[in-house]
Image (tube, rainbow, N blue to C red):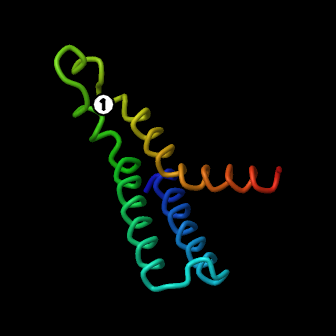
């Protein structure tokens, strides 16, 4: 298994650790809150992991018409980068929010 796949599994696990921290801090009080956040996070992680893990298979399927020859299998690295950006977006947004709150 590639390093990218292992790293993505670790980051995904850290998201669930963060969910547990939020629960024990008392920010997620009701079962509905916990369930909603868990399901949304699970879907987000699965879609992101799918893009990261299968980027080389997704790349040739992108584009139509004249762009078909432009997007070849070696464009998988760009699909993988988009997958990582999507995967890390919640952490980036939370970090920016924390910086804005503590920076004021």
Residue shown at the point (42%, 60%) measured from the top left: 45
Q: Is residue 78 above or below residue 4?
A: above
Residue 99: percent from left, percent from top:
75, 51
* Depth order, front residue of 23/87: 23
Q: Quadrant of residue 82?
A: top left
Numbered label tally: 1
Residue shown at the point (55%, 66%) measured from the top left: 15
Q: Is residue 84 above or below residue 37?
A: above
* Depth order, front residue of 65/60: 65
Circle 1: element type: helix
Q: Quadrant of residue 19?
A: bottom right
Residue 38: percent from left, percent from top:
44, 73
Residue 47: percent from left, percent from top:
35, 55
Asked if residue 55 lies left or right of residue 66, the reply is right
Q: Is residue 26 above or below residue 36?
A: below
The quarter of the image holding the N terminus is bottom left
Q: Quadrant of residue 64?
A: top left
Residue shown at the point (30%, 24%) measured from the top left: 71
Asked if residue 44 lies left or right of residue 73, the reply is right
Residue shown at the point (63%, 77%) measured from the top left: 21
Asked if residue 24 lies left or right of residue 82, the reply is right
Of all residues, the one furthest to the left in this rendering is 65
> Callout 1: 10 Å neighbours few (<14), some, many (20+)?
some
Q: Which residue is mark 1?
A: 73
């Amino acid at each position: 298994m590639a390093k990218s796949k292992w790293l993505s599994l670790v980051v995904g696990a850290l998201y669930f650790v963060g969910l547990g921290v939020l629960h024990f801090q008392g920010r997620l009080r009701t079962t509905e809150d916990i369930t909603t956040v868990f399901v949304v996070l699970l879907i987000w992680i699965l879609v992101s992991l799918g893009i990261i893990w299968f980027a080389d298979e997704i790349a040739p399927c992108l584009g139509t018409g004249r762009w078909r020859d432009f997007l070849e299998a070696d464009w998988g690295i760009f699909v993988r980068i988009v997958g990582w950006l999507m995967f890390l977006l919640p952490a980036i947004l939370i970090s920016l929010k924390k910086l804005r709150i503590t920076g004021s």
